[in-house]
Amino acid sequence: MNGIHYTIRITGLKTPEGTIPLRALRDISDTLLQGCERALRLSIEGRSVKRGKNPEWLSKSLEFTIAGISKGSTVLEIEAPTLAESAPEQVQQQTLWYTLPNPEDTAMSLLSRSVSDATSEQLESEYYDRGVLNALLSFRSPLKKYMSELEVNSKIRERDNFKIGREELEKISHMETETPQSHAIVVAGLFDLIEHARRQFQLELEDGQKVRGRADSPLITEGKMRGLWGKKVTIKGTAHFNASRKVRFIEAQIIKPFEVGEEIFQNITESKSPHRLIEELKRKQGTKSPLTEIWGQWPGEESIDEILSVLRQASVETL
């Protein structure tokens, strides 16, 4: 394998330098591989999580090899295959509206970009979604149990370098909070680009926003997609969001010609973050909020039942 060499430096272990508990190695490896898998799948397929057996190209891309363990904290020497070796067809097929990974990239390269964009709060990054963020947050467990920080470095690919510690996880957690859960959606727009090989499409909304998607049902045939090209359609499916709370990808279960009465689906209403909803609630309620009246004054001598009773009564009075 003519792969890329990485060093993974693990600090904070309670064992002597150059050693690592087997359980810690297992947990760290599982978490790292899950993050790499989701970051790579997102870059190739447009979504990071999919049910079913992993395709062969994805499994090959995750065939990392431990080449040695050395001292200086505890350092794992890792070899990772390039995508030119493990997924040549996936990185050579050109796409019309987004950039595929470079053939010389590895799955670790994609994870590095996910970490970089999430920790620098790139809200509309194409390198992470909620699935990738959840995988990164899985580092909380090994950080709590075994180590204080994990750092990945490559001498020949410095752009792949990244680290995961408590500070990075706090920023990633914030991005995860800002990214809405995937949910069902009905949306209408112009079916202006299609790519048969990947069953992918691009939908242009009334406001000019362009959203990528993929036909996720065998009932949506290539012939049907060709017949709808350049026409207005209505799509029912699952919407996936980025941290700016915009739809970034749609898994379509139904694609049909647009009909009169479906104008209400031509725009997507931006979902609001919990923080924004709380701020709006504060502005609307002002001093009438029952929480405003007791903020900084409780707990006192009242029981929790008495407090809840007062809150219920105050809520009724403000309606």
Image: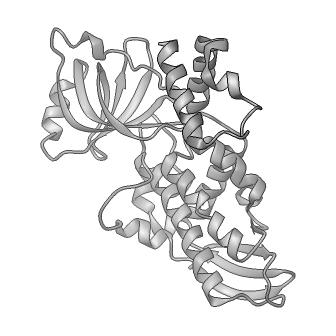
Question: Which quadrant, please, contains the N terminus?
Answer: bottom right
Left or right, residue 201 beside residue 28: left
By what rule are the colours in the image chosen? one colour
Locate residue 120, reporting x and y percent.
Answer: 73, 41
Locate residue 315, reporting x and y percent.
Answer: 51, 21
Q: Quadrant of residue 300?
A: top right
Locate residue 220, reporting x and y percent.
Answer: 16, 39
Left or right, residue 43 beside residue 174: left
Name above or below for residue 248 compared with residue 156. above
- The residue that appears at 71% across and 77% down in the rendered structure is 146
- The residue that appears at 49% across and 58% down in the rendered structure is 38
Tell me, yes or no, if residue 15 can be seen here.
yes
Left or right, residue 144 beside residue 55: right
Name above or below for residue 270 compared with residue 59. above
- The residue that appears at 56% across and 77% down in the rendered structure is 64
Locate residue 151, reporting x and y percent.
Answer: 76, 67
- The residue that appears at 40% across and 49% down in the rendered structure is 45
Left or right, residue 239 beside residue 66: left
Q: Quadrant of residue 314?
A: top right
**In the foreground, 99 or 6:** 6
Name above or below for residue 103 compared with residue 297. below
**In the foreground, 281 or 305:** 305
How many numbered circles does the render carry? 0
Tell me, yes or no, if residue 243 can be seen here.
no
